[in-house]
Image (cartoon, grey):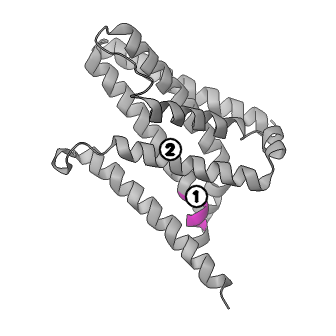
């Protein structure tokens, strides 16, 4: 199996697993606004954990060279593809919710960060294939994926922060803490590289 075939296999597996799990969940609890919200939150949070693994894979390996971090680096692209597959199913859940419930409206202006995030997700996915990565070039590819990862991370972090900190629930706290830890890992790895390069 070529790397491109693996990409498509992982993408559709992640998409199908998320979609089928959501359908099974709706069959058990029924479809209403609350169950729809639960399915959306769950798929988004699972995808985000995968994104964090992509985000810290190389910095973590630079700090701790172990078989686990080596495997993370080797599979970083496939993890990113799985993230795109889950979020494609997540997008389907969003569309389903807006069409099923009359009181749920979609505003392009109000949801502009989310729309731009999906543009970024599919740009990263499209450039995860050999031909498009080669066409983009190593330097541009690295820049696109670095900026894209930080953009997605920032938008998701914003969704986890309510109007006031006293409204943060346990899951919000956990995810925000994971984001902070990931940023610390990347910063520490960056400073370690700078120190090794300095005379």
Name the one closer to the observer, 179 or 53: 179
Residue located at (22% from left, 43% from top): 163
Residue at which label 1 appears: 57
- Please check the rendered image and state whether residue 59 is part of the magenta-colored stretch, yes or no: yes
Looking at the image, which residue sits at the far bottom?
199
- Image quadrant holding the N terminus, namely top right
Residue located at (50% from left, 73% from top): 188
| Residue 27 visible in rendering | yes
Give the vertical position of 182 relative to 90 (above or below).
Answer: below
Give the vertical position of 154 relative to 111 (above or below).
Answer: below
**Magenta highlight: main SS:** helix
Q: Secondary structure at mark 1?
A: helix
- The total number of labels drawn is 2
> Residue 143 occupies which quadrant of the picture?
bottom right
- Image quadrant holding the C terminus, namely bottom right
Mark 2 or 1, nearer chain start: 1
Name the one closer to the observer, 75 or 83: 83
Residue located at (33% from left, 20% from top): 36
Residue at which label 2 appears: 152
The percent position of residue 106, horizontal first and vertical second, equals 40, 18
Give the vertical position of 98 relative to 57 (above or below).
Answer: above
Separation (CA) of disc 2 from disc 1? 16 Å
In the picture, measured across the screen, residue 161 lies left or right of residue 44, that is left
Query: Magenta span covers which residues?
Result: 56-61
Q: Secondary structure at mark 2?
A: helix
Local packing at callout 2 (Cα closer than 10 Å; few below 14, some 14-19, many 20+) is many
In the picture, measured across the screen, residue 192 lies left or right of residue 3, that is left
Residue located at (51% from left, 47% from top): 151
Mark 2 vs mark 1: give the one in front.
2
């Amino acid at each position: 199996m070529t790397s491109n075939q693996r990409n498509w296999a992982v993408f559709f597996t992640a998409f199908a697993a998320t979609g089928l799990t959501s359908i099974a969940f709706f069959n058990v609890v029924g479809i209403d606004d609350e169950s729809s919200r639960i399915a959306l939150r769950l798929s988004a949070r699972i995808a985000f954990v995968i994104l964090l693994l992509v985000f810290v894979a190389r910095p973590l390996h630079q700090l701790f060279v172990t078989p686990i971090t080596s495997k993370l680096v080797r599979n970083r692209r496939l993890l990113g593809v799985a993230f795109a597959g889950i979020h494609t199913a997540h997008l389907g859940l969003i569309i389903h919710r807006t069409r099923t419930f009359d009181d749920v409206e979609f505003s392009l202006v109000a949801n502009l960060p989310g729309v731009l995030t999906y543009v970024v997700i599919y740009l990263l996915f499209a450039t995860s294939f050999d031909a498009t990565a080669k066409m983009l070039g190593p330097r541009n590819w690295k820049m696109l994926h670095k900026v894209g990862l930080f953009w997605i991370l920032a938008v998701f972090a914003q969704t986890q922060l309510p109007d006031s900190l006293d409204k943060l629930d346990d899951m919000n706290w956990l995810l925000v803490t994971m984001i902070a830890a990931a940023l610390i890992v990347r910063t520490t790895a960056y400073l370690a590289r700078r120190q090794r390069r300095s005379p």
